Image (cartoon, helix red, strand yellow):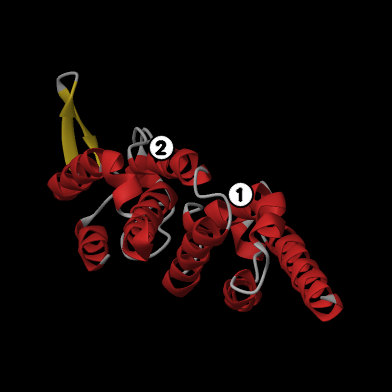
Amino acid sequence: PEAAARLRLRAMATFQALGDRLAHLVPHGCDPSAIDQAAVFDTLAEAQLCLKRTDPEDVRARQRGVEDALLRITCGGWAGPAVRRSASDVLSVLFSVGNAVALYSCVNEIMTHVTAVPERGSASKPNVGCGLTRQGAARIGAMECVARLARGEHGPAMSGSAGSLVAAVAKLLKSTDGSSAGAGRAFPNAWALTPDGARALRRC
């Protein structure tokens, strides 16, 4: 019993430390260009292993803070594909080990990025790669996160979000001509997606 208690305390301390490290690496309102994505990726890899060894009660005690950091990575519009996907996988394990009920509010938050109204003048926003604006990249990351959560055995619990996701993807792909009619005039790149961005979306 004493050895088991020591192992639990060690795992709990490790999980807390990893949560604190993530919060430090990806703080609220940080400059994306200043984020060390390699360090974030390494921390996510450690967190995924640590979660499987940590007592569920200890995970639930720190879950919300870790969720917030993971959402800043998956839906921030700055992370590279490997970092985004790793964060989505950690989020999936987090809900499997910790408080599964929190999945519903988390998916609702992710879906706000998927269905967000496009920014006016998005065609003039800086390109962050693959023909995407920052908002477009955040939208792709959010949809990718939903898909990976569903593949991580959370699909049945997420069935209510399926219709909204499909509709958002259809609207995104339909907008690849770079314009959308609205109020009698066309707004360029209405869903922050160019043909290159559409190809990135299909790869998701």
Compare marks 2 and 1 and give the one earlier in the sequence.
Answer: 1
Whether residue 27 can be seen here: no
x, y (%) of residue 95? 51, 56
Q: Nearer the viewer, residue 126 or 172?
A: 172
Indicate the secondary structure of the residue bearing disc 1. Answer: helix
Query: Height in image: 98 above or below 82?
Result: above
8 or 70, which is in the foreground? Answer: 8
The residue at the point 66 percent across, 76 percent down is: 39
Q: In which quarter of the image is the N terminus?
A: bottom right
Q: Distance between the residues labelled 2 and 1?
A: 14 Å
Percent x, y of residue 70: 56, 57
Q: What number of labels is visible? A: 2
**Position of residue 72 in the picture relative to residue 110 (left or right):** right
Q: In which quarter of the image is residue 203?
A: bottom left
Q: Is residue 15 left or right of residue 33?
A: right
For mark 2, give the secondary structure. helix
Q: Which residue is drawn at 78% across and 77% down?
A: 4
Examine the rendering and report whether any part of residue 87 can be seen: yes
**Residue at x 13%, y 45% (from the top left corner):** 174
Position in image of residue 93 (x %, y %): 50, 64
Q: Position of residue 189 (x, y in %)?
A: 25, 43
Q: Give the amino acid type for the residue marked by disc 2 in the picture.
A: Thr
Q: What residue type is labelled 1?
A: Asp
Q: Residues within 10 Å of mark 2 (few under 14, many from 20)?
A: few
Question: Which residue is under mark 1?
Answer: 68
Against 15, residue 176 (above or below) is: above
- The residue positioned farthest toward the front in the image shown: 1
The residue beneath circle 2 is: 112
